[in-house]
Image (cartoon, helix red, strand yellow):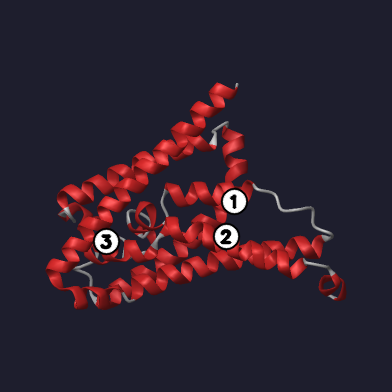
Amino acid sequence: MHDLFALPGAFSDAANTFLLIYAGLFPIVNPVGSAPIFLAMTRHFTLQQRHKAVGWIALNGFLLLLGSLFVGSHVLEFFGITLPVVRIAGGLVVTSFGWTLLQAGVRDDDHDAAQRAATPADSFYPLTMPLTVGPGSISVAITLGSQRPPEPENIAHLALLGIAAVLGLIAISLSIYLCYRFAERLTETLGESGTNVLVRLSAFILLCIGIEIVWTGVSALLGIHAGG
């Protein structure tokens, strides 16, 4: 423990890691923008069901980001899949999901899927992925995890960086929980019409994010082939 505190810059590196993880993931996870869509998709839930779903979404999101951060790049390498391809495929999923919401709002089949998501076994789709932690968030987490930190001075330094990264993911999950947990207060303020407008606007932003993810992947893929 004495060696850990003696490390010059160890805690500074840990703080930078925490901020990098949180600041890098928060804009793309965007729990504030996704909260109205979540609320619309769970509008027939009881208050207890909604709160239960929020807990499972936050937990599933944390586990998904954790796996992407620490083992995602190794899994892609094992299967020979490049990150640009993941971005293209994931961007298409997000685009499709955003387009569906934009065109039809929240349909009955979306409601049925969300209703099942009140149980632990079915809380993953569509409320956790792609709504909350989508392919864009996963690709960012994989990218952050593939960036090796400066050579740590010892195992304690490396462990401290790992703890800081996990704390960053916990902070993201808490942000998701708080934004979704108190989303109903937003609808009470906006009313039914205002909420519907906000849901459509959020769906349009989600559609744009999906297209941006696809374009980023296509650009990177073309750059790789051009460079090769």
Q: Which residue is mark 1?
A: 144
Mark 3, residue position: 37
Specify whether 78 is left or right of 118. right
Looking at marks 2 and 1 on the same chain, the residue that comes earlier in the sequence is marked by 2
Q: Amino acid at mark 3?
A: Ile
Residue nearest the observer in this picture, 92 or 15? 15
Marking on residue 21: 2
Q: Amino acid at mark 1?
A: Leu
Q: Give the structural element (helix, strand or loop) at label 3.
A: helix
**In terms of sequence position, does the residue under pointer 3 or pointer 1 come before the other?**
3
Q: CA distance from mark 3 to mark 2?
A: 25 Å
Q: Residues within 10 Å of mark 3 (few under 14, many from 20)?
A: many
Local packing at callout 2 (Cα closer than 10 Å; few below 14, some 14-19, many 20+) is many
Q: Is residue 136 left or right of residue 11?
A: left
Q: Residue at x 28, y 42 (%)?
A: 96
Whether residue 216 is situated above or below residue 53 in the rendered picture: above
* Residue that appears at 35% across and 39% down: 92
Q: Looking at the picture, how far across and down is residue 104, in whole percent?
A: 15, 50
The answer to whether the residues at label 2 and label 1 have Cβ atoms under 8 Å apart is yes
- Neighbourhood count class around disc 1 (C-alpha, 10 Å): few under 14, some 14–19, many 20 upward: many
Give the distance between the C-alpha atoms of the residues marked 2 and 1, in whole angstroms: 7 Å
Q: Amino acid at mark 2?
A: Ile
In front here: 11 or 49? 11
Instruction: Please say if the residues under marks 3 and 2 sit with CB atoms less than 8 Å apart.
Output: no
The quarter of the picture where residue 27 lies is: bottom left
